[in-house]
């Protein structure tokens, strides 16, 4: 059985629409880092050439072309094997890029070899794959313009494909131009309706489907673009601070300037007298399935104005991917009373910053492109290399599912001596601060309730602002905040909480890092900006471990947080970026009403005209349709070029015993259809009887379908 | 030389009479050219649709026999012309000679003045002679010395040629091919028929025993009757659709002309009569599309008639038949 020959596609506009969709999706995929400059050339120059060749040779395919395509396919596969055999494979992730490149190359060959509609539709389908790949790899909204262009081209291609298919439908040629027009408009309506339904279903899925977990991936991305060593291995360096890095030796005569976005807290010291206003610079993107605080480090020593990380000797951690992170000395005994879950976070560094490795508490595994990292005694991690823009690393954190009850229950137990000594010894502060702490917590029975009481008091009696007067020399920062200024930002508020807790003998420390940042619901990534730099308190609960408390804002307890839908906040995100003029709702309402009326009016008109046009199908038409249905059931559908007697003969070959019946039917139907004499009742009876008999004979019988031979 | 004269039309022959006449002629011709129903049907289609027939085949398969059997059974005047490169047009049409006794010019009709004319090996004649046939075939008249003379009615021309011979031949030009309504092959007989032939059944012997079943007058009526066979508009649309398919197909340089679609419709009517029907069905059209149209198409790639026929088969298959 030969395959029906493919009909060359004549519609140039359809071809161009497919080409645009394919090129857009190819560029979008390349934009995400797939492929080399040669592949760019393939997409931008090769695809149009290939489509042109396919169009020019659509009627006659030179054998040379076939040879070129075949040889090209072999060559591409050889290239692919060479490219993957040259490197050590570390899982599927390293296959991603070579596979995508091979796909782009094969699409070039396919472009040459697609003279027919089928080939073009396959190319369109491939563009869906490419745009999906680009979407998966995409971290930013930069894909949106590609997506828009691609969607327009794809919808146009679908409409044009339908039109060009309609043009070939032979019965249409016989109809009036109006019918043809109506059919063409119908194809637009059909495609638009499908697009609309897809948009609604997609939006619903987006708004209500849960966030995709990242835990099931086989491997996680890690990348270091330059991997330049830091000045002091194990030390903390923060190029974003520029020359004002307090850890650098002061250079006399040089004006202290810094990059606009660096936060002073990412250093060995945090001077609460320093005032800085971090700006909107995008510092990093974080892919995580739940919000958390991205922790950099903590400070233990307080001198009334400056926080210092007193112990600078790190532990060296070596390991291959992933690097296992052992518990830190300050973490205390392993957590017993609370459960844990895993939070996978991938950090995409956008601006060169400190070499601190951010992590939600408490990191357990690290995917990092260097074989060495350093762990400080408080559990914070540092890289041995600079984390330049473009660096990527993934942290798997073991989060304790802490609840209020668990915190309250931990109270009677005492913290280990070392922790008590380091973090709960009486702090440097004034007497009235101590008295205040005691007074506020007088009514609280548990440590947790004491913390809440302190937070509430500060919430009621102090004001959060970035705009505070400078700290007078020699003054105690906490005293100044609580009794004089009553104004402060996270550093003042967090420090006050820690100092007061220490005054009460509760182990606490000040932690710096980034707050969650805003989640972009379209990329699923948290966008962390310089202004999200943050300081908060961590309190040690025996049996539970360190728990963050943010008196400035509400810190979700991991055990209470729930995972939202993927599209949560999409509307808020959009409305924050798009300003909607006040008259817009009215315009939208008027437009919607107009569209509704137009659709309704069209519907009514069409219904009327359909009622007018309706023609009862003739007797012969119904009987012929029945014969065709019976034949199709028997496995032999009628081809449009077959006359009734030919079809009857074909069916008779399947069932020779029914031959006389079949020939009778064909003869009478042809006579009824093509002779001027109206059909006679006895002829009707013969046909109906024969059809009934055939239906009886062929009930339940279904042969292997015989393909209709065209052109043989 | 026997010279028939054109006569006035007899009253219309009924459809049934025409059909039985056709069947009788077919039986007689098949008795001579045995085992070849298809060429016989096509020859009768050409005859009854008022067209002309071109038989393309190698020598010795019965081309002449077919023409002779047709001529004999319809009972008209039969002339045969053997084409050679030195055949002159006047040798076909006739010449005027000076009659000394009457002191006047007298026209001596050529072999074209017959009801059935067999032009053997047409492609051996010079283009000049071939073109002289053109007027005769299309106009059914010849002009000699400025005087136009009507050919007898009906006038049926059967030409033969051997397509495999190229030396010393002049291939027919397209305009001339267009004037043949049907082109057919005969092909070698199957072994059983050939054995019967060798043992003296059919062939020349049967031809000698053939009796006429008709006369030219009745045949002319039958041809007129064929034209009145009913054709539904949908079937006419089908003819047009096939013609259009050849015109719009990119592989075809010159598609079917309106004369071609008219010939196809007339041939379909004749085929319906041969089948005993009073109306044309799409099967008639589909069946005849190749023998009527193939020789008129000019494909973009120079193709033999066989290739054009194969191409046309698939093209016709792609045209949807009329559907209620």
Image (cartoon, coloured by chain):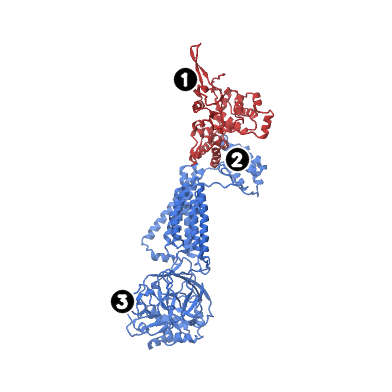
Chain colours: A blue, B red
Q: Looking at the picture, tell me which residue is in the foreground, B199 or A202.
A: B199
Q: Which percent across, then down, holds residue A208?
A: 49, 65
Placement of the C terminus of chain A among the 4 image quadrants: top right
Q: In this view, does B160 lie above or below B94?
A: below
Q: Which percent across, then down, holds residue A496?
A: 40, 82
Q: Looking at the picture, tell me which residue is in the foreground, A169 or A436.
A: A169
Q: Please say if the residues under marks 1 and 3 sit with CB atoms less than 8 Å apart.
A: no
Residues under labels 2 and 1: Cα distance?
54 Å
Q: Which residue bears the numbered disc 1?
A: B145
Q: What element carries label 1?
A: loop
Q: Looking at the picture, tell me which residue is in the foreground, A557 or B167.
A: B167
Q: Which residue bears the numbered disc 3?
A: A255
Q: Please say if the residues under marks 2 and 1 sit with CB atoms less than 8 Å apart.
A: no
Are labels 2 and 1 on one chain?
Answer: no
User: Which residue is at the far left?
Assistant: A253
Q: What label sits on residue A534 in the rendered view?
A: none
Q: Residue at x 56, y 39 (%)?
A: B310
Chain where mark 2 sits: A
Are labels 2 and 3 on one chain?
Answer: yes
Q: Which percent across, then down, holds residue A685?
A: 63, 40
| Label 1 Cα neighbours within 10 Å, binned few <14 / some 14-19 / many ≥20 | few
Q: Looking at the picture, tell me which residue is in the foreground, B178 or A214.
A: B178
| Label 3 Cα neighbours within 10 Å, binned few <14 / some 14-19 / many ≥20 | few
Residues under labels 2 and 3: Cα distance?
98 Å
Residues under labels 1 and 3: Cα distance?
122 Å
Q: Which residue bears the numbered disc 2?
A: A646
- Choose mark 2 or mark 3, whichever is in front: 3
Q: Is mark 2 on a helix, strand or loop?
A: helix
User: Which residue is at the far right?
Assistant: B199
Q: What element carries label 3?
A: loop
Q: Earlier in the sequence, mark 2 or mark 3?
A: 3
């Amino acid at each position: 059985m030969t395959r029906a020959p493919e009909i060359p596609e004549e519609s140039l506009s359809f071809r161009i629409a497919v080409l645009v969709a394919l090129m857009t999706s190819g560029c979008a995929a390349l934009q995400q880092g797939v492929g080399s400059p040669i592949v760019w050339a393939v997409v931008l120059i090769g695809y149009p050439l290939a489509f042109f060749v396919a169009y020019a040779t659509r009627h006659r395919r030179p054998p040379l072309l076939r040879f070129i395509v075949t040889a090209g396919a072999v060559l591409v596969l050889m290239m692919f094997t060479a490219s993957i055999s040259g490197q050590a494979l570390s899982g599927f992730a390293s296959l991603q890029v070579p596979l995508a490149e091979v796909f782009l190359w094969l699409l070039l060959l396919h472009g040459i070899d697609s003279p027919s509609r089928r080939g073009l539709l396959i190319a369109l389908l491939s563009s869906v794959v490419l745009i999906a790949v680009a979407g998966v790899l995409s971290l930013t909204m930069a894909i949106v313009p590609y997506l828009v262009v691609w969607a327009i081209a794809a919808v146009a291609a679908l409409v044009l494909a339908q039109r060009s298919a309609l043009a070939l439908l032979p019965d249409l040629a016989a109809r009036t131009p109006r019918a043809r027009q109506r059919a063409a408009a119908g194809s637009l309506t059909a495609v638009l309706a499908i697009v609309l339904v897809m948009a609604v279903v997609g939006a619903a899925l987006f708004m209500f489907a849960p966030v995709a977990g990242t835990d099931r991936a086989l491997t996680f991305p890690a990348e270091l673009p330059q991997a330049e060593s830091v000045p002091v291995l194990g030390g903390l360096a923060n190029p974003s601070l520029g020359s004002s890095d307090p850890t650098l030796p002061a250079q006399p005569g040089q004006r202290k300037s810094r990059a606009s976005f660096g936060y002073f807290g990412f250093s060995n010291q945090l001077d609460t007298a320093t005032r800085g206003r971090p700006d909107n610079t995008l510092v990093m993107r974080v892919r995580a399935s739940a919000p958390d605080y991205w922790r950099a480090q903590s400070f233990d020593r307080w001198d009334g104005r400056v926080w210092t990380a007193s112990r600078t000797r790190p532990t060296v951690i070596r390991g291959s991917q992933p690097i296992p992170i052992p518990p830190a000395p300050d973490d205390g005994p392993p957590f017993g009373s609370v459960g844990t879950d895993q939070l996978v976070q991938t950090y995409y560094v956008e601006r060169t910053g400190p070499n601190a490795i951010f992590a939600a508490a408490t990191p357990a595994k690290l995917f990092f492109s260097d074989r060495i990292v350093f762990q400080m005694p408080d559990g914070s991690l540092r890289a041995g290399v600079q984390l330049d823009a473009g660096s990527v690393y993934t942290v798997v954190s073991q989060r304790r599912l802490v609840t209020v009850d668990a915190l309250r229950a931990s109270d009677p137990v005492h913290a280990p001596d070392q922790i008590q000594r380091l973090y709960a010894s009486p702090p440097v502060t004034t007497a009235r601060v101590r008295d205040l702490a005691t007074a506020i917590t007088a009514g609280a029975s548990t440590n947790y309730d004491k913390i809440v009481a302190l937070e509430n008091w500060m919430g009621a009696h102090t004001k959060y602002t970035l705009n505070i007067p400078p700290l007078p020399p020699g003054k105690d920062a906490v005293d100044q905040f609580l009794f004089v200024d009553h104004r402060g930002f996270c550093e003042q508020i967090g420090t006050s909480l820690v100092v007061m807790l220490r005054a009460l003998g509760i182990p606490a420390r000040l932690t710096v890092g980034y707050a969650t940042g805003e989640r972009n619901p379209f990329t699923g990534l948290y966008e962390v900006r310089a202004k999200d730099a943050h300081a908060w308190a961590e309190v040690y609960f025996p049996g539970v471990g360190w728990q963050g408390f943010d008196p400035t804002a509400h810190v979700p307890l991991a055990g209470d947080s729930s995972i939202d839908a993927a599209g949560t906040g999409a509307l808020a995100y959009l409305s924050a970026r798009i300003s909607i003029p006040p008259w817009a709702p009215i315009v939208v309402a008027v437009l919607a009403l107009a569209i509704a009326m137009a659709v309704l009016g069209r519907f009514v008109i069409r219904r009327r005209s359909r009622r007018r046009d309706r023609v009862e199908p003739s007797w012969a038409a119904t009987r012929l349709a029945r014969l065709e249905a019976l034949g199709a059931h028997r496995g032999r559908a009628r081809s449009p070029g077959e006359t009734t007697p030919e079809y009857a003969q074909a069916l008779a070959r399947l069932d020779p015993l029914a031959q006389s019946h079949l020939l009778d039917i064909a003869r009478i139907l042809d006579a009824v259809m093509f002779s001027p004499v109206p059909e006679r009742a006895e002829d009707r009876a013969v046909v109906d009887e024969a059809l009934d008999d055939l239906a009886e004979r062929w009930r339940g019988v279904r042969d292997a379908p015989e393909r209709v031979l065209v052109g043989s | 030389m026997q010279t028939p004269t054109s006569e006035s039309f007899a009253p219309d022959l009924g459809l049934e009479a025409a059909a039985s006449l056709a069947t009788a002629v077919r039986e007689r011709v098949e008795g001579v050219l045995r085992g070849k129903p298809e060429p016989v049907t096509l020859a009768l289609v050409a005859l009854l649709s008022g067209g002309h027939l071109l038989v393309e085949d190698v020598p010795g398969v019965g081309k002449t026999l077919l023409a002779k059997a047709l001529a004999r059974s319809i009972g008209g005047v039969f002339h045969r012309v053997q084409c050679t490169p030195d055949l002159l047009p006047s040798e076909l049409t006739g010449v005027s000679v000076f009659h000394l006794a009457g002191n006047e010019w007298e026209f001596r009709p050529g072999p074209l003045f017959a009801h059935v004319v067999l032009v053997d090996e047409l492609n051996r004649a010079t283009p000049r002679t071939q073109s002289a046939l053109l007027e005769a075939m299309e106009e059914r008249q010849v002009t000699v010395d400025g005087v136009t003379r009507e050919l007898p009615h009906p006038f049926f021309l059967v030409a033969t040629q051997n397509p495999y011979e190229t030396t010393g031949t002049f291939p027919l030009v397209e305009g001339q091919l267009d004037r043949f309504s049907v082109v057919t092959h005969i092909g070698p007989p199957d072994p059983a028929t050939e054995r019967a032939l060798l043992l003296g059944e059919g062939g020349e012997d049967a031809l000698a025993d053939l009796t006429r079943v008709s006369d030219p007058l009745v045949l002319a009526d039958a041809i007129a009757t064929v034209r009145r066979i009913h054709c539904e508009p949908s079937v006419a649309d089908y003819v047009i659709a096939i013609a259009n398919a050849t015109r719009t197909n990119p592989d075809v340089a010159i598609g079917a002309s309106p004369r071609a679609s008219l010939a196809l419709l007339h041939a379909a009517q004749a085929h319906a009569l041969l089948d005993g029907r009073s109306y044309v069905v799409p099967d008639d059209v589909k069946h005849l599309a190749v023998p009527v149209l193939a020789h008129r198409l000019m494909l973009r790639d120079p193709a033999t008639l066989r290739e054009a026929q194969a191409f046309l088969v698939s093209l016709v298959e792609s045209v949807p038949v009329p559907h209620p």
